[in-house]
Amino acid sequence: MFRQASFVFLFLGGILFSSSFTHPDAAEELTWEAWNSGYPRGIKEKKIILVDAYTDWCGWCKKMDRDTYANQEIIKKINKSFVPVKFNPELKQTYYIDSTAYSGRELHAMLSKEYSTGYPTTYFILTTKNKIFINPGYENAEQFAKTLDRIVAAAK
C-alpha cells in the first residue's frame, strides 16, 4: 500500500512539476470593437481610440491584419494604451458620436478631415486632447510600433 501511495504521489508531483515548464506564457489577443461600443468606451476611460479604417477588398488592409496587428509586441502596446476599433466606411450602418448619427462615408470624411486617405488608414483619437492623428497606408510591425509610441507620447 505504501509503495502504491508513493508511486501515485511521485506521479502526480511529476505531472505538476513538468506542466509548469511545458506551458509558455499564453499569447495576448487583440479584441477589436465596433465603433458604437469602442468610441464611447474610449471617451469614458480617457484612452486613445485606435480606429482601423479598412474595406473588404483592400489587400493592404488584410496584410496589416495578418502581419502587423497579429504581432505580439503590437498587441501588447495596443492593449495597454488604446481602445482598438475596426471601421469599414462602406458598410450600410449608422455610427454615433454622442447622439449624432453618421453614415460610414460621413464618419470617414469627418475623421479624414475631408482629405482622401485610402485604405488602410489608422486614426488615433486622443480623447483627452480633442485631437485626431491620421496615419494613412500600410505599416509593418516595426514601423507601427514606432507610430504607437509616438502617439502615446503625444497623448501625455
Image (cartoon, rainbow, N blue to C red):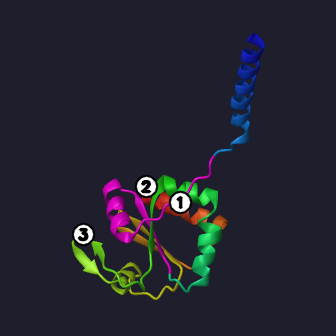
Q: Which residues are magenta?
A: 26-54
> In the rendering, at what x and y percent does residue 145 appear?
60, 62
Residue 125, visible in the rendered structure:
yes
Of callouts 2 and 3, which one flags the residue occurring earlier in the amino acid sequence? 3
Q: Nearer the viewer, residue 141 or 21?
A: 21
SS assignment at label 3: loop
The residue drawn where x is 54% and y is 62% is 148
Q: Nearer the viewer, residue 91 or 43?
A: 91
> In the rendering, at what x and y percent does residue 89 appear?
42, 83
Task: Report how far apart the C-alphas of labels 1 and 3 lie in the structure.
Answer: 26 Å
* Callout 1 amino acid: Leu
128 versus 140 height, above or below: above
The residue drawn where x is 53% and y is 60% is 30
Q: Which quarter of the image is occupied by the N terminus?
A: top right
Q: Which residue is mark 2?
A: 156
* Callout 2 amino acid: Lys
The residue drawn where x is 36% and y is 60% is 42
Q: Residue furthest front?
A: 1
In the picture, measured across the screen, residue 97 lies left or right of residue 126, that is: left
Residue 71 badge: none
User: Which one is closest to the eye, mark 2 or mark 1?
Assistant: 1
Q: Which residue is mark 3?
A: 98
Q: Which residue is mark 1?
A: 30
